[in-house]
Amino acid sequence: MGIDYAFLGIGIIIGSWLIQMIQTFRVGKAMSPVFAILQFIGIALLAVNGAIIGTGMTTFDYVNGISAICALVMFGILIRKK
């Protein structure tokens, strides 16, 4: 049995939200670059999951891909502001 990329992706997304919540409570309301890059990785894994399991890319996978790109752009903005 191979890796379940959808499960791994959603786990990373949930983990990144937990990290972001902890940082928000400790430091303030600023978004962390770590959060943005973990969101990108998690969402990208969801986007490629359909292709890997052999069902091909669905509209849902493409929307996840767009979401992943948005997270990557946000990461770029956050690291440039530091």
Image (cartoon, grey):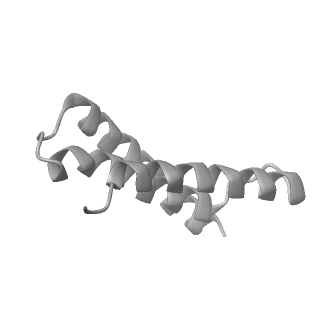
Residue, far right: 26
- The reply to whether residue 10 is in sight is yes
Judged left or right of residue 25, residue 77 is: left
Which residue is nearer to you in this view: 80 or 45? 45
Q: Residue at x 42, y 46 (%)?
A: 70
The answer to whether residue 73 is visible is no
Rendered location of residue 57, percent (x, y): 15, 40
Q: Is residue 55 left or right of residue 25?
A: left
Q: Position of residue 27 (x, y in %)?
A: 86, 60
Instruction: Say whether residue 32 is left or right of residue 68.
Output: right
For image coordinates 85% across by 53% down, the residue present is 28
- State whether residue 78 is above or below residue 70: below
Which quarter of the rendered picture does the C terminus lie within? bottom right
Q: Residue at x 76, y 50 (%)?
A: 21
Q: Between 68 and 58, which is closer to the camera in this rendering? A: 58
Answer with left or right where residue 33 lies relative to residue 10.
Answer: right
Determine whether 56 is above or below 11 in the image.
Answer: above
Report which quarter residue 62 is drawn in. Answer: top left
Residue at 33% x, 55% y: name it.
Answer: 5
**On the image, which quarter does residue 72 sit in?**
bottom left
Toward the front, the furthest residue is: 1
